[in-house]
Image (cartoon, rainbow, N blue to C red):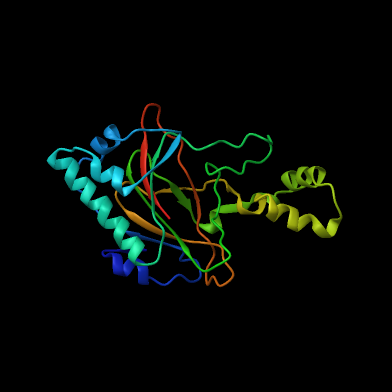
């Protein structure tokens, strides 16, 4: 679903198989300049609004900064807790060779309370989503489930709790022929989360593999 204003993004109804909505935008400004002037302290560095304000930017860079500041304020005013991240790469999960639980794996977000995930990639590669009918839950794939049972050391009654505790149940494998949708740059997305009061299936998504030498600038909450 595509909308043309922040108010529509917030008010859009999630139900059934509708679990993602996009505020489609063609942004102006030089977001690459902002990335070039920020300091990456770790592979993922949270950028404060004070640090963003302090940057000395060209006119195009100032335009980009104003967009980020406005998005940040819109989300904060709506009750969200946005974070601006400068990202080289996320930590990879290589503990098991048969299942991955990092953000590069297709997964859903989960919360104990009613909430949504918001994200916007201003610079760099963008995330992807898949329709729920194009994925299968990894814990239901026989060969993966068998290996998880071999990994689990406890009574049968506790197996499902084990899967949840270690986030195995949040991850999905694309079916043959699945076609991911790239979320693009500049668009602000709202994705449905797995929570007790949800009226739809949670949105299945993943972080992209970053390009060598290119950082991502991502607003997320």
Q: Residue at x 52, y 72 (%)?
A: 199
Number of on-image labels: 0
Q: Is residue 140 visible?
A: no
Q: Is residue 120 visible?
A: yes
| In the foreground, 87 or 127 | 87
Query: How far from the left and from the top, in percent, is residue 56?
Result: 19, 37
In the rendered image, the quadrant that contains the C terminus is: bottom left
Q: Extreme left residue here?
A: 59
Q: Extreme right residue here?
A: 155
| In the foreground, 65 or 122 | 65
| In the foreground, 73 or 67 | 73
Query: How far from the left and from the top, in percent, is residue 5?
Result: 26, 65
Query: How far from the left and from the top, in percent, is residue 142?
Result: 74, 48
Q: Residue at x 61, y 44 (%)?
A: 101
Query: How far from the left and from the top, in percent, is residue 43?
Result: 46, 34
Q: Residue at x 17, y 44 (%)?
A: 62
Lateral position of residue 163 relative to residue 150, left or right: left
Up the image or down, 98 lies above or below 79; here it is above
């Amino acid at each position: 679903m595509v909308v043309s204003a922040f108010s529509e993004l917030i008010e859009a109804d999630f139900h059934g198989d509708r679990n993602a909505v996009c505020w489609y935008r063609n942004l102006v400004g030089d977001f690459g300049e902002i990335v070039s002037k920020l300091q990456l302290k770790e592979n993922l560095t949270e950028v404060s609004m004070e640090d963003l304000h302090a940057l000395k930017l060209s006119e195009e860079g100032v335009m980009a900064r104003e967009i980020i500041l406005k998005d940040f304020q819109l989300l904060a005013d709506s009750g969200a807790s946005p974070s601006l991240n400068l990202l080289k790469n996320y930590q990879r999960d290589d503990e098991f060779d048969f299942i991955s639980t990092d953000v590069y794996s297709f997964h859903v977000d989960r919360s104990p309370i009613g909430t949504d995930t918001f994200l916007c990639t201003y610079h760099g590669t963008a995330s992807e989503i898949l329709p729920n009918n194009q994925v299968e839950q990894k814990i239901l794939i026989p060969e993966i489930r068998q290996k998880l049972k071999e990994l689990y050391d406890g009574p049968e009654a506790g197996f499902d709790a084990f899967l949840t505790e270690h986030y195995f149940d949040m991850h999905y494998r694309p079916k043959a022929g699945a076609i991911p949708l790239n979320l693009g740059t500049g668009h602000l997305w709202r994705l449905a989360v797995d929570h007790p009061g949800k009226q739809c299936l949670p949105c299945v998504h993943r972080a992209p593999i970053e390009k060598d030498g290119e950082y991502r600038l991502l607003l997320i909450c």
